[in-house]
Amino acid sequence: MNPIDDRPPPPHLHEVVIPKEKAVFWMDGRGRWQNRHGRFEHKRIIDHFNRSIRRDEDGYYVTQVRGDVLEKVYFPYEDTPLFIVRVSPEAPLRLGLNTGEAMPLDPAALFVESDQLYHKSGDARIKFSDRALLAISPYLEEKADGLSICIEDHSWPIPDRCPAP
């Protein structure tokens, strides 16, 4: 999921890197893009930003090409920049991410932290959006020993994890 992007920029483009301290936009804890004027409202812009999320050894960034310049902007985010925004009910359940990527649900990769549901993929934490939580809720069951996900005749416990310090 969002593997390290070690591809060099196309040779005809000059790369400009903007550190997250100088970024003029950020992502909040619910996966919404914002700037000093407030939340982004235009779906096409939001979709462009989400599809542009990449990661390298320095963190998450978005890119855009402006003429012969490739801008690489590291951006601040609360919690994680990766969100599950869709759950497709066909077997096996498939998860759609804000980046446009899709992946199968791995019940063993689910965990709860600070009352939020996440799916781990490699070292990436992917948070369920409110809409995705509604879609997956028919598969969730509160049991005496905690939350579980139940798919067909199988049940997997969903562990609680303490937030990182």
Image: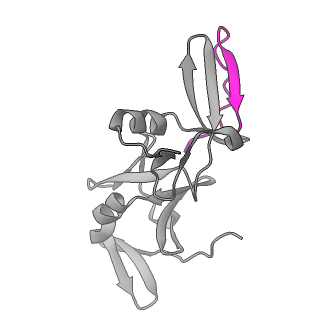
Q: Is residue 120 left or right of residue 69?
A: left
Residue 21 at x, y percent in the picture: 70, 43
Residue 124 at x, y percent in the picture: 59, 53
The residue at the point 41 percent across, 77 percent down is 148
Outermost top residue: 12
Residue 157 at x, y percent in the picture: 46, 77
Q: Is residue 84 above or below residue 140?
A: above
The residue at the point 63 percent across, 39 percent down is 23
**Which scheme is used to colour this image of the protein?**
one colour
For the N terminus, the image quarter is top right
For the C terminus, the image quarter is bottom right
Q: Is residue 32 above or below residue 165?
A: above
Q: Is residue 47 above or below residue 141?
A: above
The magenta stretch spans residue 95: no
Q: Is residue 51 left or right of residue 13?
A: left
The residue at the point 55 percent across, 19 percent down is 65
Q: Nearer the viewer, residue 22 or 114?
A: 22
Magenta-colored segment: predominant secondary structure: loop
Residue 58 at x, y percent in the picture: 73, 41
Q: Nearer the viewer, residue 16 or 3?
A: 16
The residue at the point 59 percent across, 75 percent down is 161
Q: Nearer the viewer, residue 44 or 141?
A: 44
Q: Is residue 10 above or below residue 89?
A: above
Outermost bottom residue: 144
Q: How many marks?
A: 0
Res 160 → quadrant: bottom right
Q: Is residue 152 visible?
A: no
Q: Is residue 68 left or right of residue 101?
A: right
For the magenta stretch, what is the residue range? 1-19
Outermost front residue: 37
Q: Is residue 57 visible?
A: yes
Res 123 → quadrant: bottom right
